[in-house]
Amino acid sequence: MLWLKLLLPILTLSVALVQIELEYRWHDRRTKRHRWVRRILILFIIVASFITLNVVYQNHQDSLIRDQTLKEIKNQGEESLRAAEERERKAQNERNFLEKQIVALNGKLDPFVEIAKVRYPNVSEEAALSKLAEDVKDLQKRAQQLEVEARRAHRGITVTYDFVGMKRETGPGIIRGSKGRQPVYLKIKELRNQNRWDELIEVCEQEMKTTPEWLTPYLYAGVAYANIGSREKAIKLLLHVQREAAGDPQYQEVDSLLKQLKK
C-alpha cells in the first residue's frame, strides 16, 4: 500500500505541472506578472507535494511501528496466556494429587477414628481424635520411662517415691535421695485443703503421666473424683494405690476410703 500512497501525490503533481505548461503554451498572456505567478504556483505545488510525500511516508512508518507494537503485545499476551494455562495445569495436578492423598489418608485414619469414637463416645469426632493423639503421646512417654526403668533394673537400680514425693534411688553401692516431686506434692496438698477438685484432678492426672510410679497423685485424684460424684473413677484409682502400696502405712487411708465408696 505504500507505493499507492506515494503514487497519488506524484500524479497530482504531474497533472498540475502539465496544466500549467499547457496554459503557458496556449495563452498569449506572457507578461512579467503572469510568469511570476506561474513560478510561484509551481513552487507551491512542489513544496506541497513534498510535504504530502513526507506526511505519507511518516504515516506509513508510524503504521509499521504500531503494527510491530501490536504484534509484540499480542505475543506477550499469548505467552502470558500459555503461562497461565501451565500454572492452572500444575495447580490442577497438585489438587488431584492432594485429593488422592486425602482419600488415602482418610482410609488410614478410619481405624483410628473408630477407636477414638469408642474410647470417647461423648465428644465430637475431632475432639476424640485429639484426645487419642494425647493418649498416644502419653504411651510414647511411658514407653520411654519403661525403657529407662528396664535399664536401671538391669543394673540393679530401683527408684521409688514416698508419700510426699521424696525420690530414692537404691542399687549396688548406691543410695541416693532428692526432693523429687515435693513441690508438686505441696501444690496437691494446697488444692486438696481448698477443695479445688477440678484443678486437683488436672494436676494429679498430669503427674500420673509424668511420674506413674508415685502413688500419691492417684490417691488424691481418687479423692477429687469421689467429691465430684465420679465414684467409679475414684474406686479404680484407689484400688490401684491399694494394690501398688502393698501395705505401706503412708497410704493406709486408702482402705477406709474404699470402704466408704463401696457402701
Image (spheres, rainbow, N blue to C red):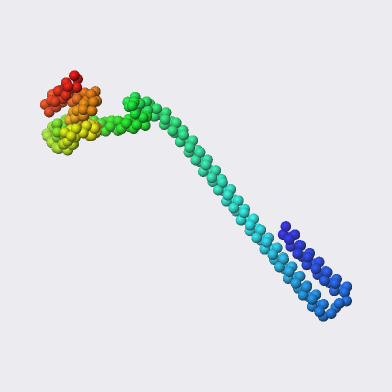
- Residue 103 locus on image (x, y percent): 44, 31
* Residue drawn at x 12%, y 34% as measured from the top left: 175
Q: Residue 215 or 61: which is nearer the viewer?
A: 215
Residue 171 seen anywhere in this rendered image of the structure = no
Outermost residue on the bottom side: it is 32
Q: Is residue 119 left or right of residue 47?
A: left
Outermost residue on the top side: it is 263
* Residue 56 occupies quadrant: bottom right
Decide: is 99 above or below 254: below
* Residue drawn at x 14%, y 31% as measured from the top left: 163
Decide: is 31 above or below 5: below
- Residue 257 locus on image (x, y percent): 16, 24
* Residue drawn at x 26%, y 33% as measured from the top left: 141
* Residue 189 occupies quadrant: top left
- Residue 218 locus on image (x, y percent): 20, 29
Q: Is residue 236 left or right of residue 32?
A: left
Total numbered labels: 0
> In the rendered view of the protein, which quadrant contains the N terminus?
bottom right
- Residue 43 locus on image (x, y percent): 76, 73
> In the rendered view of the protein, which quadrant contains the C terminus?
top left
Q: Is residue 197 left or right of residue 29?
A: left
Residue 40 seen anywhere in this rendered image of the structure = yes
* Residue drawn at x 18%, y 36% as measured from the top left: 187
